Every structure is written in structure tokens, then in C-alpha cells.
Image (cartoon, helix red, strand yellow):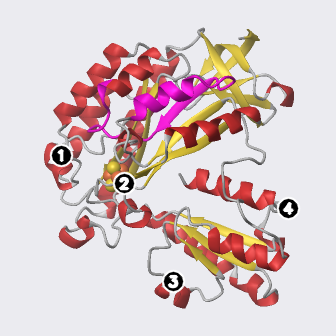
Amino acid sequence: MNKADSERLESAMEQMGLISTPSPTNADIVVLNSCVVRQSAEDKVVGMLESLKGGKNSNPDKIIALMGCMVGPNTTSLEKRFPHVDVMMPPQQYDPLIELIGDRMDIDTEGCIGPLTANPTVAAYVPIIHGCDKFCSFCIIPYRRGREVSRTINDIVRETKLLADRGVKEITLLGQNVDSYGHDLPENIDLGDLLYAVNEIDSIERIRFLTSHPNDMSDHIIDAVANLDKVCENINLPFQAGDDEVLSRMRRGYSNSHYRKLIEKIRSQIPNVSLNTDLIVGFCGETDLQFERTLEMLREVRFDKVHAAAYSNRDGTIASRKMEDDVSLEDKKSRLKAVQELQTDIQTEINRKLYDQTMQVLVEGIKRGKAHGRNRNDKLVYVEGGEDSIGEVVNARIHKTSPWSLTGLKESVA
Ligand code: SF4
């Protein structure tokens, strides 16, 4: 979501005639888009803000802006702590910066923040619902991004068509909880209806969505993924913990048996689906035995990709107010390592089965002399090819596999 927000602001700034520079040192404007989902992310932003002080002292005209989840509704303490920051903007509230730039450059900024229009790449993000109403006990997002607000289908379709006109082939529909899209709109619609509408747009070849919640993944959404040719067979469905007691303390609202049944349903209705998940180790009170149930879930479901994080206390959350962060750092680290080792073995085995298979890859860029893109299952694939192949869908025959990526030879343009 932060990446999408940054792209949107960048697009507006480009429309105002600004160009990006590779380093903040010589930039006239530096914008930090902050994430506070974990302490390490917040520490990074603080370090960066400190390092910008010198540049601001030697060039007081330099504009420094802080946006994103670090900026809550009340900015007084941040302003005291970082007086060299000119603008503080909560997520998606870009106006103060746009107006300041407009004043400095003496230009009209009306309509600058709209759909993405400047230089999108082959694959773009389209936010469809902002905020979250779930209030999981560990999570700061509902406090920083507010309650759920869905965009209308017409608005999303209009933006996607604009992106398609500028060469975008793949869109990822984004939301903190993308499956609850539409519930706040007057029409009786959901993510399934939106997927049907976006599937109709010519020249969009692939559609993805992120991130799902097990309680809101409806049959209609599963049917849409199963039936629509452009919607990729990949679902990111966080389970967070394998133990019911931990899930209940997390306020996730489902049990591990509900989660397993949902996975069975998805797999039976969407052949070849790949599944990604998010999980937290070392949540308040998690015992060794409870953590073992998380490993069991991984062994049983065999996800294609896992985003694992050690629990990090966030001030203001329900867990920070009512629970004790009592799992030692050492235990958190060793649990994380156990997840990573197990998952590496699983991904090695899953990907090895793809050896000699031919798959469609949408080429997104060039890295170390090789073209790279993803297959429909969201796996990173390297193929031979140059800049001219960016945006092409190629058939790649896989001749090398690793837990993290695949390498293939181009057979023909798909
Ligand atoms: Fe945070 Fe996701 Fe829970 Fe919402 S559903 S509170 S974004 S973890």
C-alpha cells in the first residue's frame, strides 16, 4: 500500500514538472513514506530523518516531508522531535505537500492527485479500499489508516483503463483487507463483482489482489478467481498463527480448522492455485507448543511463499495495552529461523516440481543482464531477453529452480 501511495505522489509531482533524483543529497524535495508496522521499519525512518538534518541546515529551502503511517492524527510530538520536517501527512493525504510545492513554484495544483498517469510500469497497484475495521490486537494499521472506505467500481475501472492506455498489463488491486471491498458502498457489491468488471478491460492481461482475510474470503470471490481468465491463480491469505488460543488473543476471529477448510475449498475450486501467507512468531504468551502448531500448519498446507515476522510491540494497539510482550528476543529469533528453514525446504520441493514445465511470464524488468517477471502463480522467473521484452508475455521453459526463483528459456511469445 505504501508503494502504491508513493507511486501516486510521484505521479502528481511529475505532472507538476518535477523529476526524481537517485539520492536525497541533491534533491530539492525529500519525501519519506513511513511504515510503522514493525519497530525495525520505524527505526529506519527515524534514522533517515536524522540523517537529513545536515542537508536541511545547509539548504533551508530544501523541503522535507514525512508521510505514511508514522504520522497519526496528532503531529505535535513528531513536530517537536523533528523540527526540520516541513510537512507531515497522514496516509493518502498529500495535499499539504502539493500545495507547498505549488506555492514555491507558483503553479496551479488543482487535480494533480488523481489516477496514476505518469510513467507507470508494466505492473501497477490500484488501491481499492483504504483502512481496516478489524482491529487485530497486534496491529497499528486501523489507528493510522482509519476505518474502511471503498472506492467505487466506476472510479477503479476508470483508473485501470488509464493505466492500460499507458501500457500497464497487470494490476494488483490493493487493500489492507481487500476481501471486505464494497461492504461500505450503497450498492450490494463485493470484490467478486469488481474482479468481473476489471476483467472486461481490454489490454489488461492479468489481475491480482492483496491482502485477503480468512473471514471475508467469500464463495463469490473464490468463484471469480476460478472463472475469470485474467485473474491470476494466486491468493495471499494470512493465517498469522497455527494455535487457536493465540489466534483468539490476536483477535483474528477464526480458528485454525476454519482456515484449513477454507484452504481446502480454494484448492478444490481453483486448480493450480498458489498460496502465500503471512504469520507472526512470538506473539504475547505464545508457548513452544503453540508455536509448534504454526510449523504444523506450514507442513500441512505447504504454502508457496511465507512472509514471517517476529512480533514487535506497537504502542496504541490492544496487545500493547492489555498483554505482555513476554516471549524473549532469543526465542522469537529461533522461531523465525525454524519457520524460514522449514519453508525453504518446502519451497525447494514445490519449485523443483516445476522443472521442465513451460509457463507464461510477464516480463517486468531487467536485472543482472536477465529479463525477469512473474508467472501467474506469482513466482519470480528469469528468462533471457533485453529491454525490448519488457511488457511481453513469454513462454518460458524452466531449466533451473531454487526456493526463491525459477530460470527458464524463452520458447516463443505467448
Ligand atoms: Fe491489521 Fe490486517 Fe488485522 Fe486489519 S486485518 S487489523 S490490517 S492485521
**Distance between mark 2 and mark 4 Cα atoms:** 34 Å
Sequence order check, earlier mark of 4 and 1: 4
Q: Does dot 3 land on a helix, a strand or a loop?
A: helix
Mark linked to residue 53: none
From which residue to which does the magenta span run? Answer: 190-219
**Position of residue 140 in the picture relative to residue 284 (left or right):** right
The C terminus is located in which quarter?
top right
Circle 4 Cα neighbour tier, 10 Å, few/some/many (<14 / 14–19 / ≥20): few
Disc 3 marks which residue?
A: 78
Q: CA distance from mark 1 to mark 3?
A: 38 Å
Q: Residues within 10 Å of mark 2 (few under 14, many from 20)?
A: many
| Marking on residue 132 | 2
Question: Does residue 408 appear to the left or right of 254 in the view shown?
Answer: right
Q: Nearer the viewer, residue 78 or 247?
A: 78
Q: Which mark is residue 290?
A: 1
Residue type of the residue flagged with mark 2: Cys
Mark 2 C-beta closer than 8 Å to ligand 1:
yes
